[in-house]
Image (cartoon, helix red, strand yellow):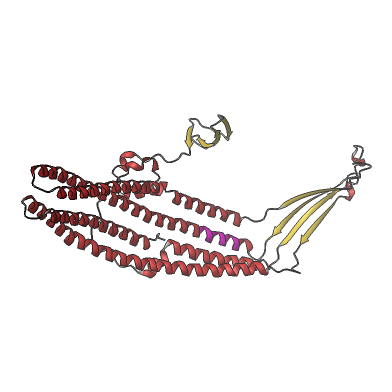
């Protein structure tokens, strides 16, 4: 079924419910003056353009994520449902209309048809429950706190999913870099195998040397294939988070690696913890539990049900009468001890959950600070010292081997060290980028 809104310029309103399978259209319309109908239909988001995915920046990925991430949309719907519960909680009890009929005799029926012959008495009544003890106010406040908790849950889901998005983005970039380095190394070894074949035929090297180069070439080609598979897995993971699974194979992370800039500034733990969405949600639930406890205690304040009635006697209108009713519950056997005890336990559980979440958030904050410092130090060491040294050694070995100054094993060792240094360096860049994302996620909060 598709729901469309047909809007007239002016004061409008046409709602159309369309059953597409059987082509049935039911239109419920309230039409006011005006002309020129515009059709506004609720549609799913348009597919992400493939050209955008082929050069996807992290900022673009976060923008798409905010509109299409399924977990975030689910949390948003839960928050909207909780806000709808506030309307239900704030509503007062509805009055009740009742009607009863008596003096129906199975032998004589209800009379011959003349008003004077009808023996049926009819009673019409109206009753209303009056809540006391501020029950409706407490119920509404509890629902409002639960709605606020649900909105903070939505913000926390967004925080966690955004961290997963950033991690997936840098995992894809790492896989891309690994595939590039592995493919380059594999191509280099293929050329070395071809050159070694010529030298073997010329008698410059032994057959065992050719075999050693071929073994390393096969390893490099296997590494390249594994890196390709890892890149494809990373594309699928990132595409899911932004709702672009149909074009997962076209997703390319185009941002450069973050540069080392001394990490992020130290944070005030108390300020961060007080404003984090997950802690706010837990605090809202504590407040809701407090209101529910008050509401449970308010059950001991008796509600009053008042009513009026009119009794009609056919054929004897002079005896028609009015009446009033009032009812008050008597707590003779049960005084809501179970409800009150349950509310107290739920409040205690909410307070303990708040402390657990706060302790977990503090641990996450300290852990991300330490991880970021370690990742930055490792990245600097690899980028500034290890990788240049390994590259210099590999270039020197290539030069020396071409002139017969060193043996094949020395050349292969230098190549392996340079290849390993390249992989370790990009891995350090990825760890540093993800450490930054983790730190920002741990300190993220929504402004008041």
Instruction: Decide if residue 94 is in sight here.
Output: yes
Residue drawn 30% across the image and 48% down it: 226
Instruction: Decide if residue 254 is in sight here.
Output: no
- Relative to residue 194, is residue 159 drawn left or right? right
Q: Nearer the viewer, residue 398 or 137?
A: 398
Q: Which residues are magenta?
A: 138-148
Which residue lies most toward the right here?
A: 107
Tell me if residue 4 comes above or below residue 72 in the rendering.
Answer: above
Where residue 106 sits in the image (x, y, percent)? 91, 43
Q: Nearer the viewer, residue 332 or 87?
A: 332
Residue drawn 47% across the image and 58% down it: 153
Please check the rendered image and state whether residue 356 is part of the magenta-colored stretch, yes or no.
Answer: no
Tell me if residue 21 comes above or below residue 136 in the rendering.
Answer: above
Where residue 224 sits in the image (x, y, percent)? 26, 47
Where residue 375 sits in the image (x, y, percent)? 27, 63
**Image quarter in which the N terminus is found:** top right
Please check the rendered image and state whether residue 144 is part of the magenta-colored stretch, yes or no.
Answer: yes
The main secondary structure of the magenta stretch is helix
Q: Nearer the viewer, residue 252 or 400?
A: 400
Q: Nearer the viewer, residue 190 or 365?
A: 190
- Relative to residue 387, is residue 440 drawn left or right? right
Where residue 293 sits in the image (x, y, percent)? 60, 67
């Amino acid at each position: 079924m598709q729901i469309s809104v047909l809007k007239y310029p002016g004061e409008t309103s046409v709602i159309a419910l369309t059953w597409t399978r059987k082509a049935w259209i039911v239109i419920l319309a309230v039409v006011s003056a005006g002309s020129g109908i515009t059709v506004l239909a609720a549609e799913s988001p348009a597919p992400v353009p493939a050209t955008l995915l082929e050069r996807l920046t992290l900022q673009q990925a976060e923008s798409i994520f905010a509109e299409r991430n399924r977990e975030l949309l689910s949390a948003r719907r839960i928050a909207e449902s909780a806000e709808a519960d506030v309307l239900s909680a704030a509503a007062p009890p509805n009055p009740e209309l009742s009607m009863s009929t008596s003096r129906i005799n199975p032998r004589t029926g209800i009379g011959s048809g003349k008003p004077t012959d009808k023996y049926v008495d009819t009673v019409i009544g109206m009753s209303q429950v009056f809540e006391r003890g501020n029950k409706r106010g407490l119920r509404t406040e509890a629902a409002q706190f639960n709605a606020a908790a649900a909105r903070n849950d939505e913000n926390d889901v967004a925080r966690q999913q955004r961290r997963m998005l950033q991690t997936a983005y840098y995992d894809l970039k790492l896989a891309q870099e690994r595939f590039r380095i592995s493919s380059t190394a594999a191509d280099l070894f293929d050329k070395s195998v071809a050159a070694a074949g010529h030298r073997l035929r010329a008698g410059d090297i032994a057959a065992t040397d050719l075999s050693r180069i071929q073994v390393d070439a096969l390893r490099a080609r296997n590494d390249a294939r594994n890196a390709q598979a890892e890149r494809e897995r990373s594309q699928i993971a990132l595409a899911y988070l932004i709702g672009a699974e149909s074009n997962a194979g076209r997703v390319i992370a185009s941002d450069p690696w973050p540069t080392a800039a001394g990490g992020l500034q130290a944070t005030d733990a108390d300020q961060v913890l007080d404003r984090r969405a997950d802690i706010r949600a837990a605090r809202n639930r504590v407040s809701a539990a407090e209101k529910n406890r008050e509401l449970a205690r308010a059950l001991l304040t008796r509600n009053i049900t008042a009513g009026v009635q009119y009794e009609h006697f056919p054929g004897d209108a002079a005896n028609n009468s009015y009446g009033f009713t009032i009812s008050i519950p008597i707590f003779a056997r049960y005084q809501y001890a179970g409800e009150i005890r349950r509310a107290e336990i739920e409040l205690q559980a909410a307070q303990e959950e708040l402390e657990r979440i706060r302790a977990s958030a503090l641990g996450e904050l300290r852990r991300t600070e330490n991880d970021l410092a370690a990742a930055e130090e490792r990245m600097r060491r690899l980028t500034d010292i290890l990788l240049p040294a390994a590259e210099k050694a590999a270039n020197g070995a290539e030069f020396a081997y071409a002139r017969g100054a060193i043996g094949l094993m020395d050349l292969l060792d230098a190549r392996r060290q340079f290849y390993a240094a390249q992989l370790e360096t990009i891995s350090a860049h990825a760890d540093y980028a993800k450490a930054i994302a983790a730190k920002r996620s741990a300190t993220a909060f929504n402004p008041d």
